[in-house]
Image: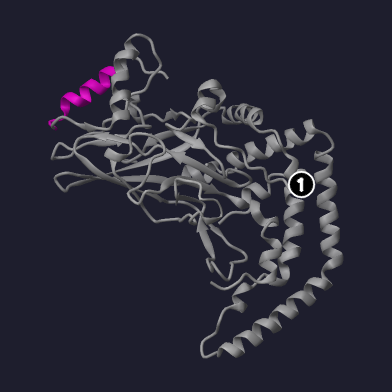
Amino acid sequence: MSEKNPAEKHLHRLYEGVRHSEELDDAVIARVKALREEEAAPRALVTRRVALVGAAGCAVAAGLALGLPVLLGPDSGGNAFGLVIARAAEGGDAVAVSAGSDGLMPCDGTYGSYIRLSLNLSVTGGSVESVTYRVTDSPMATIDRPSIHEPMTEHAVVSLYTEAPDDYGDEMPPGEIPETVTIDPAASDAPPCLDVNGNVPYLTVNNRDAFWASDETIQLLGAWLDLESRPWSDTSEYAWQEDETDEEHIERVERLTEEAWAEYDALQPQIQAAREAYLESFHAHAATQESFEEWQRSLYVSGFVCAADALGEARLEATATFSDGSTQTRRYRISFVDGCEQVLSERFDALLALDDDFSQCLEEELPWHRYPTPTEEEIAADPRLSAPIFQIEDVTGA
């Protein structure tokens, strides 16, 4: 693999924040029973977790606010399936989903415009052998300065992402953005849910343009970064050209690099002015611990709010393959619950109780703070960490 050019090395850290997101009453119980009576299917195969959730129906009658998995209408062969997190609701209404590990949970890597959600992909239904997921209808974002190493000109704002489940340190394999993710329901009964390749799937949202326009200080940072990277705005020039010898390519790259650094030197007055404007605004936020935390709170909430439109447009598509070889596809829309800004603000307070060390941000004079993924024990101890941020709705027929 070729080395990064000097500009990419220089800007890597600066651009780290830029990346290519109940209750059931007796009527509902009756609805589930009616659906099941209409099915002519054999006894459903369910995972251990689904069995526990289904058993919770008995507890609902006793007044416990527990959910039931949805069993969607069977096909002509009697097959049916549904997402566990899309619990039964009257008339296909959207259902709030826990922000814990059994639902849609923001996890480590969520900062700035980038939201990374661990996703419970468990299903319930008869004779389901595999389920393949993909994201459709996502808005596309333009990449103004494609890397010579990753020459993409656009990317989906909402996408699936997979990575190895363990921390390998510096040797950790890089993650991927696959077109589809397939799981084996029988092997996905406990978090983290793994795909058939043994990787952890995430749902990611990266609406950079909306986020970077949402805060004055972030806008100033963007203006500075744009000037810093302007001499290398067209990295395609560094690529090898047809009929070009290795020597000619090396000579041309060296010439382009010299020209870029000359332009960079000429831009120094503008770059320094933009940098000073950003730092003045940054230091105003960093005047006290309290003011810096409040700014971080606004950025945390804004990162999610700016993802709302793109997330609402995209669809999570699930295609189940049954033991008889037949398939069935469901489509889901994920959106934010009403009052999500208050929920996110309270979640920020809970995360702050786990990690309020912003020393790296202050030392580097950059806003990017990576919040930890809460443990099961921490989630159980603080209801703010499981309060629903998102809701999910079956829109297959829409």
Q: Quadrant of the C terminus?
A: top left
Q: Which residue is at a point 16% across and 27% down the rendered structure image?
A: 38
* The residue positioned farthest toward the top in the image shown: 62
Above or below, comparing residue 37 to residue 398 in the picture: above
* Prevailing secondary structure of the magenta residues: helix
Above or below, comparing residue 5 to residue 11 in the picture: below
Check residue 36 for magenta coloring.
yes
Q: Residue 11 versus residue 171: which sits nearer the camera?
A: 171
Q: Amino acid at mark 1?
A: Thr
- Which residue carries the number 1 mark? 217
Residue segment shown in magenta: 29-41
> Does residue 387 appear in the picture of this structure?
no
- Toward which corner of the image does residue 49 lie, by quadrant? top left
> Does residue 374 appear in the picture of this structure?
yes
Check residue 108 for magenta coloring.
no
Q: Residue 140 versus residue 173: which sits nearer the camera?
A: 173
Q: How is the image coloured?
A: one colour
